[in-house]
Each structure stands twice: as structure tokens, then as C-alpha cells.
Amino acid sequence: MKAEGDTAKLAKLIGSPEASSAPTLPETHSHGDPVTAVLIESFLAWRTGEEAARHAFERLLAETVDFNEARVLLVEELVEVFGKTSPHAEERAVRLRRALNDVYEREHSVSMSFLLRQGKREARGYLETLDGMPPFVAARVTLLALGGHAFPIDERHVAALADAGVLSQEDESGAVSAWMERQFRAGEAFAAYQSLETACAAAPAPKKKRQSSRRPASGKKTKTNGKKARGS
């Protein structure tokens, strides 16, 4: 399904970002190669946001000696690191393990620096075919690690865009991602993504519905014959 949005409302939501390159990757990382670091960070940012991902990534680094150890952690161990209250924590752990194991089976190591030497389209294709890979993660790695033109979108971003009247809540994240890529020139997507992330972080959390405390219409308490009500 092709998404069609309101460009004027998009500009009002995130402004008109100037062209800027993504942060330069360090040559090395304490746990392995920097591209794999961005891959794991992207899994942690999926459906949670950048701040939550940063904290979870720091916990993962503290619990492991390298990315290969992170690969062999059990799902329940990863969930403990991510935090059980993290949205979709178990699915995130399962997908991350599948992706890291797929990299290991293909490359005989947990290293993805070779993608920096490939064409950006070829590198993104590699990412998209990894087992368990969400489109958001592949797009975020392409944008932040490989310098390619991509726009990471998950359900949070779709909701923020819908609340601002830019797009419909019914639009799928993949279609929204493709639409967003068409709205920005190469080099503008990183700043636009940061602005959209800021809008997501500033959005109020959905309010929980309060349970009614009203008594039955008769105004009388229900008799229980001195016994506890079933299910209490």
C-alpha cells in the first residue's frame, strides 16, 4: 500500500532539516566492530526510541565481553538485560539472536564492517535479508552506519505522524518509510529522523481508561450469602 501524506503538516511537525551527514563511525568498538554496534542499537531502538535504546545498550555492554557473547545469550537472558517492561522485549530478543546468528553463519564471525566496502544498495539488501530483521532496523543501520539514504519508521513514528495529521494511522510503516524517503534529499534524512524521534519522545503517553466504581443501578449491594464472590 502506498502512503500519501500532507507535506505542509510534515514541515510543521519536524521543520525543514538542513543537509547533514550522520555521525562518523569510530574505527573500533570495545565489543567488536562499529557496524554491529549500530545493528544492536537499532534493534533496541525499534518500538522504544533512542533514549531507551541507549540505556539498554549500556546494560548489554556491561553484561558481555563482546558481541559474540551477546549472540549466544539465551532469550530470557536478553530480556532481563533489556528490561521485562520494555515493549515487545521477548520478540526483540528472539529477532536479535536470529540476526546475529545469521551474520555468524554467513561470515563465520559476528562482524559487519565489510558492509562499509560494499555499495550502499547492496549493503542494505544484505541487511534486509538477515533472519529476523525488521525493516526499521535495516533502515536505521543503512542511515546511521552506512551513510545511505533511508528513513527508519516503526509504529511510534506512524502514530506521531497520524496525530499531526500528516498521514493516516492505517498506513503501514513500510509504506510510510518509503514516503518519507521521497520527501527528503540525500543527506537530509538523518536530521529529519532526529526531529521525528524528538516529536515521538515529546508525545504524551496514552492515558489508561479508569474503571467505573459505580454500584448497580438498584443502589443495593449484591448479596453473597456470607461467602466470597467467585473469582475474588
Image: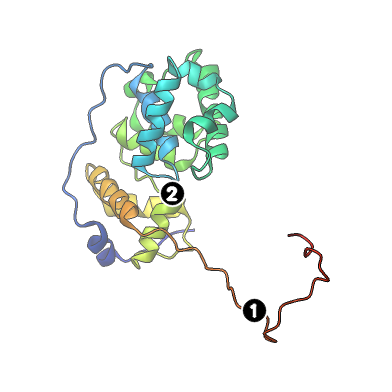
From the viewer's perspective, is the residue at label 2 or at label 1 nearer? 1
Around disc 1, counting alpha carbons within 10 Å, would you say few (fewer than 14), some (14 to 19), or many (20 or more)?
few
Q: Is there any visible trace of residue 123 in the rendered image? A: no
For image coordinates 42% across by 53% down, the residue present is 156
Q: Which residue reaches farthest front?
A: 226
Residue 228 coordinates in the image, percent (x, y): 78, 63
In this rendered view, identify the residue nearer to me: 123 or 69.
Answer: 69
> Which numbered disc, 2 or 1, marks the residue that appears first in the sequence?
2
Residue 52 coordinates in the image, percent (x, y): 38, 40
Q: Which residue is mark 1?
A: 215
Q: Is the residue 95 above or below the residue 172 in the image?
A: above
Q: How far apart are the alpha carbons under marks 2 and 1?
A: 42 Å
Residue 226 coordinates in the image, percent (x, y): 81, 68
Q: Is the residue 210 above or below the residue 182 in the image?
A: below
In the picture, measured across the screen, residue 197 lies left or right of residue 102, that is left
For image coordinates 45% across by 59% down, the residue present is 2
Q: Which mark is residue 154?
A: 2
Q: Is the residue 132 above or below the residue 231 in the image?
A: above
Residue 90 coordinates in the image, percent (x, y): 57, 37
Q: What amino acid is at disc 2?
A: Asp
Give the quadrant of residue 22: top left
Q: What amino acid is at disc 1?
A: Arg
Give the quadrant of residue 203: bottom left
Q: Is there any visible trace of residue 20 in the rendered image? A: yes
